[in-house]
Amino acid sequence: MKILITGANGQLGTELRHLLDERELAYTGTDAQDLDITDEAAVNEYFTRNQPKIVFHCAAYTAVDAAEEEPGKSIDYKVNVIGTQNIARAAESVGATLFYVSTDYVFDGTNDQMYTEETVPGPKNEYGRTKLAGEQAVASIMSKYYIIRTSWVFGKYGKNFVYTMLKLAETHDKLTVVDDQQGRPTWTRTLAEFMLYALDHQVPYGLYQLSNDNYCTWYEFAKEILKNQSVEVTPVSSEQFPQKAYRPRHSIMDLSKTKATGFEIPTWQEALAKFMKQID
């Protein structure tokens, strides 16, 4: 079973590599320097030569605000749409199974209820639009695929909200964090484990949503991160932190379909506690 990880040096790709190492499973990892996924000829040549059978497509452009600069023309579109189309076509040509990681930003954030896999998407920022286009490419091209929507990702191997809060606490006595955006934090370890679980247990192909269980605001998340730090955290509205890209105010995704596979999802509090022990 030949395994390929695109974006292997990113936050999720690195987590996945470590998990595969623990399980003594061989894989090949590529990043932009090794394989330009926006180059169709290069992707086709790579897949023809290496014949991967499992593809964890972790490569993505995730700079949400920068993606607003040139909608449809930016590197965001080239990587998340064109790159994903190239990977999907090449994977299908060699009969591979493809994992594609998507986002809660495919939703508009105005729903009062949890978003299910059947909820009609309505992204309101460019990043969400390109990730949705990537989903549509995978679903239309691939025979064997998993699309996994996730949100508020944190982990050991990249920049994320947890590290930002801990760093700020080193130099500030008081911090303000928005309290009017709700969602589900996701530990990269939990996400990587579900991906392997889907393979091991022959979970039916299709669209799934995976984050850690329970939900919170960014303020509540920050409070939990910094509960052992001598810093005061104050809630504020999103208006006090204007950003180029729209952020969903309510992006709580329903996890029922994923839970029905038998995969046990830790709460975000449990996941955060284990992560904090890792980095102590």
Image: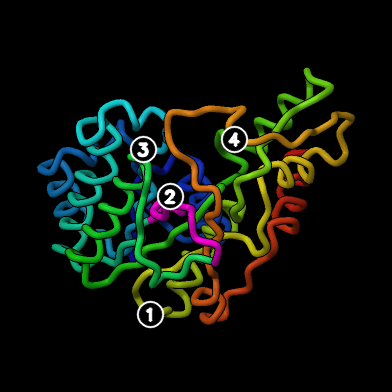
Q: Residue at x 25, y 33 (%)?
A: 71
Residue at which label 2 appears: 105
Amino acid type assigned to the residue bearing label 4 in the image: Ser
Q: Residue at x 52, y 58 (%)?
A: 192
Q: Disc 2 or disc 3, which is closer to the eye?
A: 2
State how far apart marks 2 and 4 are (Cα): 16 Å
In magenta, the rendered stretch is 101-113
Q: Secondary structure at mark 4?
A: helix
Q: Earlier in the sequence, mark 2 or mark 4?
A: 2
Observer-nearest of 21 and 121: 121
* Residue indicated by mark 3: 61
Tell which circle, 1 or 3, labels the residue nearer the N-terminal end. 3
The quadrant of the picture occupied by the N terminus is: bottom left
Residue that label 4 marks: 238
Q: Which mark is residue 204?
A: 1
Mark 1 and mark 2 residues within 8 Å of each other at the beta carbon: no
Residue 236: in magenta span:
no
Q: CA distance from mark 4 to mark 3?
A: 24 Å
The crowding category of the residue bearing disc 4, from other C-alpha atoms within 10 Å (few below 14, some 14 to 19, many at least 20), is some
Q: In the rendered view, would you say 55 is above or below 238?
A: below
Residue 6 in the image: state x and y as whole percent: 34, 47
Of the residues tagged 4 and 3, which is closer to the observer?
4
Label 1, label 4: how many angstroms apart (C-alpha)?
39 Å
